[in-house]
Image: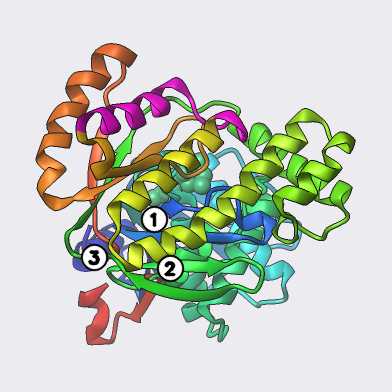
């Protein structure tokens, strides 16, 4: 939804006009999966899909929220320091962000909020981070908190970790907050340093949502993180970033098989991100193809987060385009999406082949998006003319 339409809907919802607007994108991770919370490297870019939030101050201490993605539903809560989860799953993300801002000492007040998004939800494209960052941008502007994009990202991550109970790393929120148009960001998650790399014009980013239903993912996800932390501790290093394969082999006898395998994925994936960044710079699709294939195998066999549907989509892409595509699962796994980088001219062939080969075999209907790397968090006051560009 464009900004003007959102502002009109806000007026219909609250019978008063919005004062400000904030929007943040979902993301697709090119390579570097589960490395962020191990202080490693990632290489994501933002999507053109965004979550927008329009707001207006209230005279009381209530947060009143609607989302155009959940018609007929609403969420309302009072801003107290004892804020806990409510009954609405999506409403809890709003509670989470408000609670974490207050916990960090930022003074908030009542707001009417309207959320609207075209980021696919639950597809591993980070609609939750887009929401946390867009909400953070709205709070930052509404209450003049003076936060940087990096701080908004960190607070969003804290909301997801401490309030929602998902032990995600910083990648999703950071790329949503700081992405640059047509660029992939190489993030060093140890110090949050970002280098940007242009995505070559001739390279298409095809994102295929498997639409495989994800269930009980959070506990699996948190278990993976615990395995990584245990493996690092057994090697006597602060994080897996500090380890290498020789050290892992030497210390392997102290680990469970899962700890060993999770660590082997993370250590090898960090190296692949470094090589992929170079390959992207050289527009070397063959090298990217090799690295992405290795990443996917490692996620399937060592990190054990793929499902037959995502393995199948990767296989279908490779069967259709061979080494002329770089493809792997992307995001948190257990379903979700696959990314396939290929030349623009091969896109029609791929888009034609996937439904034919996927639907019959898996009984699922995929959704295909041709991604173009968008910009990070943007905010504007409605009094200003810039609203139109959000
Ligand atoms: P992902 O981040 O991969 O899309 P998650 O399960 O982490 O998947 O987050 C999806 C959840 O985020 C949704 O189920 C919903 O609760 C919340 N959410 C995302 N976008 C919106 C939105 N536009 N309006 C309300 N809630 C949203
Ligand atoms: Mg999420």
Q: Is mark 1 within 8 Å of ligand 1?
A: yes
Question: Crowding near pointer 1: few (<14 within 10 Å), some, many (20+)?
Answer: many
Crowdedness near tag 2: few (<14), some (14–19) or many (≥20) residues, C-alpha within 10 Å:
many
Mark-to-mark CA distance, 2 and 1: 14 Å
Tell me if residue 79 can be seen. Answer: no
**Quick one: quadrant of the C terminus?**
bottom left
Q: Secondary structure at mark 3?
A: loop
Q: Which residues are magenta?
A: 301-320
Along the horizontal axis of the image, is 3 left or right of 61?
A: left
Q: Quadrant of residue 359?
A: top left
Asked whether residue 10 appears in the rendered view, the answer is yes
In the picture, residue 261 is in which quadrant?
A: top right
Residue 200: mark in rendering: 3
Indicate which disc, 2 or 3, sits on the residue closer to the N terminus.
2
| Magenta stretch prevailing secondary structure | helix
| Mark 3 burial class by Cα count in 10 Å: few <14, some 14-19, many 20+ | some
Residue 93 vs 357, above or below: the answer is: below
Whole-angstrom CA distance, mark 2 to mark 3, is: 14 Å
The spot of residue 167 in percent (x, y) is 67, 48
Quarter of the picture containing the N terminus is bottom left
- Residue at which label 2 appears: 185
Q: Find out whether residue 187 is within the magenta segment.
A: no
Question: In the rendered image, which residue does mark 1 sit on?
Answer: 26
Mark 2 or 1 closer to N-term?
A: 1
Q: Position of residue 211 (x, y in %)?
A: 36, 29
Disc marking residue 318: none
Real-space CA distance between mark 3 and mark 1, rounded to the nearest whole angstrom: 20 Å
Q: Closer to the camera: disc 2 or disc 1?
A: 2
| Nearer to us in this view, 105 or 355 | 355
């Amino acid at each position: 939804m464009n900004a003007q339409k959102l502002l009109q809907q806000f007026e219909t919802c609250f019978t008063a006009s919005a004062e400000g607007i904030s929007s943040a994108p979902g993301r697709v991770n090119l390579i570097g999966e589960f490395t962020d919370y191990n202080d490693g490297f990632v290489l994501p870019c933002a999507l053109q899909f965004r979550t927008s939030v329009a707001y207006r101050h209230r005279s009381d201490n209530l947060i009143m929220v609607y989302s155009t993605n959940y018609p007929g539903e609403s969420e309302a809560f009072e801003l107290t320091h004892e804020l806990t989860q409510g009954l609405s799953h999506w409403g809890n993300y709003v509670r989470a962000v408000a609670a974490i801002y207050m916990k960090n000492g930022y003074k908030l007040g009542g707001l009417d909020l309207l959320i609207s998004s075209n980021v696919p939800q639950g597809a591993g494209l980070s609609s939750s981070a887009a929401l946390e960052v867009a909400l953070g941008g709205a709070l930052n502007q509404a209450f003049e908190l003076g936060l940087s994009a990096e701080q908004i990202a960190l607070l969003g991550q804290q909301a997801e970790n401490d309030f929602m109970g998902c032990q995600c790393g910083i990648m999703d929120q950071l790329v949503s907050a700081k992405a640059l148009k047509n660029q992939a960001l190489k993030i060093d998650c140890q110090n949050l340093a970002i280098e940007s790399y242009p995505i070559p014009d001739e390279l298409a980013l095809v994102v295929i949502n498997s639409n495989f239903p994800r269930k009980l993912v959070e506990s699996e996800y948190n278990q993976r993180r615990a395995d990584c932390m245990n493996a690092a501790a057994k090697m006597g290093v602060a994080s897996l970033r500090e380890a290498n394969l020789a050290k892992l082999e030497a210390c392997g006898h102290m680990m469970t098989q899962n700890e060993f395998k999770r660590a082997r994925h993370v250590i090898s994936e960090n190296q692949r991100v470094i090589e992929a960044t170079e390959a992207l710079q050289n527009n070397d699709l063959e090298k990217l193809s090799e690295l992405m294939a290795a990443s996917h195998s490692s996620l399937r066999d060592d990190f054990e987060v793929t499902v037959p549907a995502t393995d199948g989509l990767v296989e279908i892409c490779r069967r259709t385009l061979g080494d002329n595509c770089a493809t792997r699962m992307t995001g948190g796994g257990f379903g979700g999406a696959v990314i396939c980088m290929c030349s623009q001219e091969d896109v029609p062939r791929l888009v034609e082949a996937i439904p034919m080969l996927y639907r019959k075999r898996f009984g699922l209907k995929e959704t295909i998006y041709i991604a173009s790397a968008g910009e990070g968090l943007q905010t504007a006051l409605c009094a200003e003319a810039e609203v139109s560009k959000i």
